[in-house]
Amino acid sequence: MKTLDFKTWLEQLNALNRGQKDRLRTELERRGNADEVIRLIEHDLQEKPLCPHCGNTQLQRWGVSCKLQRYRCRQCRHTFNALTHTPLARLRHKDRWLPYTQALIDGASVRQAASTCGVAKNTSFKWRHRFLSSPARQKAGQMHGIAEADETFFLESFKGKRQLPRKARKRGGKAAKRGTSVEQIPVLVVRDRDGATADFRLTGVGTREIEPVLGPLLAADVILCTDGAAAYTVIAKNLGVEHHPVNLAQGVHVRRGAYHIQNVNAYDSRLKQWLLRFHGVATDYLESYLGWRRMLERFGKDILPGMCLRAALGKERHFQQVTAT
Ligand SMILES: [Zn+2]
């Protein structure tokens, strides 16, 4: 806009009524957000140009679409932008992405996030799983020092499914059977004293189920602490790692000061407490929620919407200290 036109345009602002002014303010804020989102998305590609198709670094600019710079690879000749091959590719309304990640930080429900971000409920649902798909895969790849392992259980839930594979439980119902039953989904949580965390949805809690996921996590010099379930004793022996079972059933909580599973247990209880707000988590999406929680814990109190957005893109370096599985 020419300077003179802009001046005339500004003078007209006085003619706006209160509602129109509010709308203008909101609109400006949204557009500002979209610019910030573009900056966060394009940051890496500008720092280090790389073709997502073949890894070549010789790129040429190929126009702009939806505010994103398009590139063409000189080697494979495919075109792409900074969102290509990320979980957020082709999602619309970029101006709402930062408010949406704030809703993730706040632990908002699908409905709450939809209302605060001004998107439809279905969009909010779709976004949640797209935004969490990368965090769900980012787990600690290796434990160091003392690693605590323990299982925790989640009630199986078919929430949101039209066809139930079995009769629905009464609202707020408990598992039909006590303890471990077919209705309880076991999750193995492993955490070292630096806070590196990995969790795995299991099909059972025997050696056969635990060893394949626990084994690759444990460096040879790791010291494993568990509740002393027989499976861990076998696994530790198989892997040749030092193992300190803590027999909680006999009232033993700490052995020789350092050997306990209080960190992993505290993590489990924070996770469960935080999950209460969702009134049951669909088992199909359990891993998204586990990743969501890991992300919040990893960033801690310094968490910012931009960090979550970059984690959603799989580009947050701080979050990548833990390797993707
Ligand atoms: Zn290429």
Image (cartoon, rainbow, N blue to C red):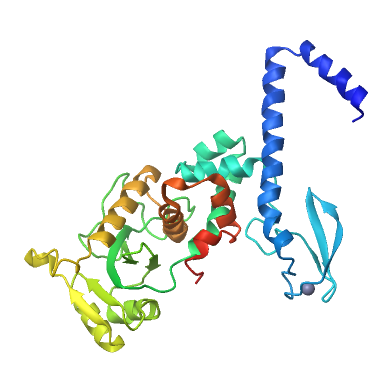
The one of 230 and 220 positioned closer to us in this rendering: 220
Report if residue 188 is visible in the image.
no
The one of 268 and 224 positioned closer to us in this rendering: 224
Is 19 on the left or on the right of 15, as rendered?
A: left
Residue at the image point whose x is 56% and y is 38% from the top: 114
Give the image quarter of residue 210: bottom left
Above or below residue 196? Residue 12 is above
Residue 96 image position (x, y, % from top left): 64, 41
Residue 70 image position (x, y, % from top left): 81, 58
Residue at the image point whose x is 28% and y is 87% from the top: 240
Residue 282 image position (x, y, % from top left): 43, 54
Is 262 on the left or on the right of 254, as rendered?
A: right
Residue at the image point whose x is 51% and y is 41% from the top: 103
Is 226 on the left or on the right of 51, as rendered?
A: left
Give the image quarter of residue 267: bottom left
Residue 123 image position (x, y, % from top left): 61, 45
Residue at the image point whose x is 73% and y is 69% from the top: 50
Above or below residue 40? Residue 50 is below
Q: Where's the N terminus, which quadrant?
A: top right
Above or below residue 158? Residue 122 is above
